[in-house]
């Protein structure tokens, strides 16, 4: 049989039962649309989380107090022997490959200015915080490079705090009350927006030593370190560990390179995307069962047609290919419709919910179409073999 005749015959067979063909293809279309929509949300979440963590740069290391150790199958334990101090952070500035170091403590505080008050997130930081996290000052300056141990009462405002308290007036040089202490405003940060639920614009930045006194804390929450982009992260980690062990006498801290953190996040998010794709692909099985059922019925209905084909010289292989072609075409048409449906729903979700991270992964879409064709091919094997094995004489008698 010529290829043109094969294609014409396959389309004609499907067109002869339009409603049945449409309903069968719909099962595949829903499966593909589900796969595409779920993977679009999963991939969007993946990109969102990675973008949130990398907007401050990727050559960073975080040091937190306490060491996490694993015992058998337990989750672990945290044992803080000695708190992380500002002196520890200052000592790490002398480590090889290290560019900037920032001690960090965080809490909530009430700020007041001319009778207006507002509760904000207060960050106790070092003078290199803006350099470590690649943040910029919109007006004024950042905290000066004072002695870390006895800093002056200076404050830098987030853009939202400055707008709420001062409106169009410049806050530079004014004095605000933070947690009962007066601070002089020396700068206003550029708008940064929310990062993992934290609004950096609704924040106030003060010297870390003053924040420790305000919150009555002994230990820093963490020390943030940026290192040279070309430096091997293992060497940086080893150097930081060496300095802190020399100061503390034991490894009572945890060092977390952002590079390794992103690898873990990437692995987890890829697994989630694959899992939701697999869940969506379950509906493809339903579509495959539909194709199997429809083709089984078709073989029974077209027994006489099959006998006639065999009588005029069609081989068993030709009959087998005809029915397999119908199954593959049904699945391909349903898959294409599912791609359009999934892409449309993903686009509508993005318009209706701009905060929802949705990204259409066309690689997954292409794989979904291939899986749909494979499902159609697998579902069509049994009916096609049954049709090919019909005895021509018995098939003609059934006519």
Image (cartoon, grey):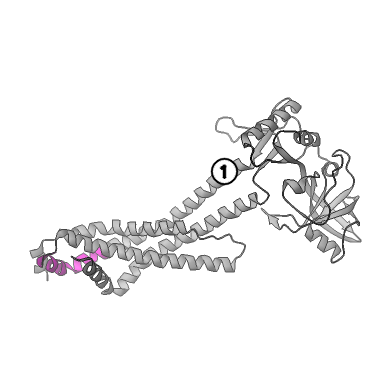
Element at badge 1? helix
In the image, residue 329 lies at what x, y percent? 31, 65
In-image side of 343 versus 53 (left or right) = left
Q: Which residues are magenta?
A: 294-314
Q: Residue at x 18, y 68 (%)?
A: 302
Total numbered circles: 1
Report if residue 222 is visible in the image.
no
Q: Relative to 173, does residue 19 appear above or below in the rendering?
A: below
Q: Relative to 155, does residue 62 appear above or below in the rendering?
A: above
Q: Residue at x 29, y 56 (%)?
A: 378
Q: Relative to 153, does residue 194 appear above or below in the rendering?
A: below
Question: For residue 312: magenta?
Answer: yes
| Figure quadrant of residue 22 | bottom left
| Figure quadrant of residue 127 | top right
Quadrant, the N terminus = bottom left
In-image side of 363 versus 74 (left or right) = left
- As rendered, which of 263 and 105 lies closer to the eye? 263
In the image, residue 330 lies at what x, y percent? 32, 65
In the image, residue 290 lies at what x, y percent? 32, 63
Q: Which residue is mark 1?
A: 263
**Number of residues whose C-alpha sits closer than 10 Å to that of mark 1, classed few (under 14), some (14–19) or many (20 or more):** few
| Figure quadrant of residue 61 | top right
Question: For residue 266: magenta?
Answer: no
Report if residue 24 is visible in the image.
yes
Q: Residue at x 78, y 59 (%)?
A: 159
In-image side of 186 versus 323 (left or right) = right
Quadrant, the C terminus = bottom left
Q: Relative to 169, does residue 265 appear above or below in the rendering?
A: above
User: Magenta part mainly helix, strand or loop?
Assistant: helix
């Amino acid at each position: 049989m010529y290829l043109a005749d094969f294609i014409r015959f396959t389309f004609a067979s499907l067109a002869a039962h339009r409603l049945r063909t449409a309903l069968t293809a719909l099962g595949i279309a829903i499966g593909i649309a589900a796969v595409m929509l779920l993977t679009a949300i999963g991939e969007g979440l993946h990109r969102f989380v990675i973008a949130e963590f990398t907007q401050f740069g990727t050559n960073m290391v975080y040091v937190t107090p306490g060491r996490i150790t694993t015992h058998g199958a337990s989750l672990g334990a945290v044992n803080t022997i000695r708190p992380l101090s500002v002196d520890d952070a200052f000592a790490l500035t002398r480590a090889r490959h290290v560019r900037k170091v920032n001690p960090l403590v965080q809490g909530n505080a009430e700020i007041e200015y001319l009778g207006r008050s507002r509760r904000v997130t207060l960050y106790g930081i070092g003078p290199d915080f803006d350099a470590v996290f690649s943040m910029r000052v919109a007006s004024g300056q950042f905290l000066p490079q004072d002695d870390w141990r006895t800093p002056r009462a200076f404050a830098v405002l987030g853009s939202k705090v400055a707008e709420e308290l001062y409106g169009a007036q410049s806050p530079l040089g004014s004095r605000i009350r933070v947690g009962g202490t007066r601070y002089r405003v020396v700068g206003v940060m550029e708008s940064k927006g929310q990062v993992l639920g934290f609004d950096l614009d609704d924040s106030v930045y003060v010297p870390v030593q003053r924040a420790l006194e305000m919150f009555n804390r002994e230990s820093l929450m963490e020390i943030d370190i940026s290192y040279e982009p070309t430096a091997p992260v293992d060497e940086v980690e080893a150097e930081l560990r060496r300095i802190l062990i020399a100061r503390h006498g034991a490894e009572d801290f945890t060092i977390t390179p952002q590079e390794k953190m992103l690898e873990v996040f990437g692995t987890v998010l890829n697994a989630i995307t694959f899992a939701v794709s697999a869940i969506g692909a379950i509906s493809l099985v339903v579509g495959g069962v539909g194709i199997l059922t429809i083709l089984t019925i078709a073989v029974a209905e077209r027994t006489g047609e099959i006998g006639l084909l065999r009588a005029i010289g069609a081989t068993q292989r030709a009959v087998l290919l005809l029915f397999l072609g119908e199954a593959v075409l049904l699945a391909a048409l349903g898959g294409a419709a599912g791609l359009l449906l999934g892409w449309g729903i993903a686009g509508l979700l993005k318009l209706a919910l701009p905060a929802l991270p949705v990204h259409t992964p066309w690689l997954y879409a292409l794989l979904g179409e291939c899986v749909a064709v494979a499902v159609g091919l697998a579902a069509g094997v049994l009916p096609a073999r049954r049709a090919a094995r019909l005895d021509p004489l018995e098939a003609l008698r059934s006519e």
